[in-house]
Image (cartoon, helix red, strand yellow):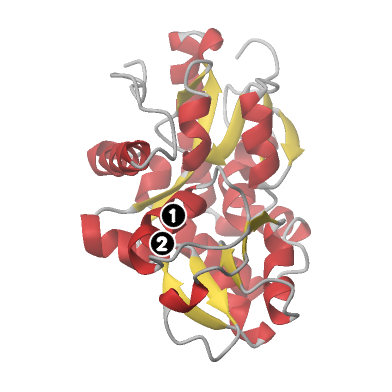
Amino acid sequence: MAERLSIAYSPCPNDTFVFHAWAHGEVPGADAPEVTFADIDITNGLAERGELDVLKISYGALPWVLEEYALLPCGGALGRGCGPLVLTLPGVGSPAELAGKTVAVPSERSTAYLLFRLWAARAVPGGFGEIVVLPFHEIMPAVRDGRVDAGLVIHEARFTYQQYGLHSLADMGEAWEAETGLPIPLGAIVARRSLGAERLRELAATIRTSVRQAWADPSASREYVLAHAQEMDPSVADQHIGLYVNEFTADLGEEGYGAVHALLTRAAAEGLVPPLDPGALAFPS
C-alpha cells in the first residue's frame, strides 16, 4: 500500500491479537501502520474528529462518523455470550431497584450503552439518576467502594468481577440475543472513505490476513498481547481472545451486518443515535 496508514485500537487482547501481524509488518504486501493505543471512548472521539485513517470504535458511535468513515467488513468484535454486564454490590435483587440510582458506564456512545439503554427502558421503568462516564478499568472499583450504585462493564470484566465482590444483576447480551436472536455488535473497524474503494478493499484484505495469521500461530502474538494487557492474567487474556475473536472478526457476513443494522435502527427509533441513511453500512465490492 502507498503511504503508511495510522490506526488506533485498544490495548485489549482481542485487538492486539488481531492486529499483531499487520502492526509488525508481517502481512505480505502491506506496510506496518502507525499504531496508537487508546480506550474505546478515546477512539470514538478520534473518529468523530476525523484524526486517523483507521480506528477501532464502538458500533454505538458509528452513526456519527459514517459520512467520513466506511465500516470495514472485518477486524471488529461481534459475538454471542459476550455482552456487557450490569454490576452491583450483593443485595440488589432486581433491576427496578436501580431507579434513581447512579450508574457508571464506559462511554455514552458505546454499544454497551446502547444495549443498556434499550434494556433499561423495559427493566428500569423509573429511570436512572445520574449516568457517569469512567474508564472501564475504574468502574468495578467505583461500584465496590460505593462511589456509584451500579456499573456497566465490558471485556475481561466478565471474568474478573467476582474478585471485586460484585454481583451481576443483568447481562445485556443475553437480553439482546433473547429478543433478536442476533449476535451482539460491539466494536467496529472503520477507515477513511477518502482512501478510495480500491485501497479500502486492500485494507480489508490486509486485516483478514492478519486475523488468519493470528489464528494459524497464536504463539506469535503472545508477547505483544501480554505486554499491553495491563497486568492481566494470561489465562484471562486467552479467554478474552476466545470470546471476542471469532468468525465475525474475519467477515461480518450477512448475519453480522444484520445485527449491526438491527442495533442501530432500534437505537435510532429510541432517539439514541441518528438514523442510518440507506447504504450507509455498505462496503465497496
Q: In the picture, which quadrant includes the C terminus?
A: top left
Residue highlighted by disc 1: 117
Q: CA distance from mark 1 to mark 2?
A: 5 Å
Classify 153 as above or below 18.
below
Image height check: is 112 above or below 234? above
Q: Are marks 1 and 2 in contact (CB under 8 Å)?
A: yes
Report which residue position mark 2 lands on.
120
> What residue is drawn where x is 43% and y is 66%?
126
Q: Return the residue found at the far bottom.
A: 91
Nearest the viewer among 163 and 3 is 163
Q: Is residue 84 above or below residue 3?
A: below
Q: Secondary structure at mark 2?
A: helix
Residue type at tag 2: Ala
Any part of residue 233 in sight: no
Q: Is residue 44 left or right of residue 116?
A: right
Q: Does residue 190 appear in the picture of this structure?
A: yes
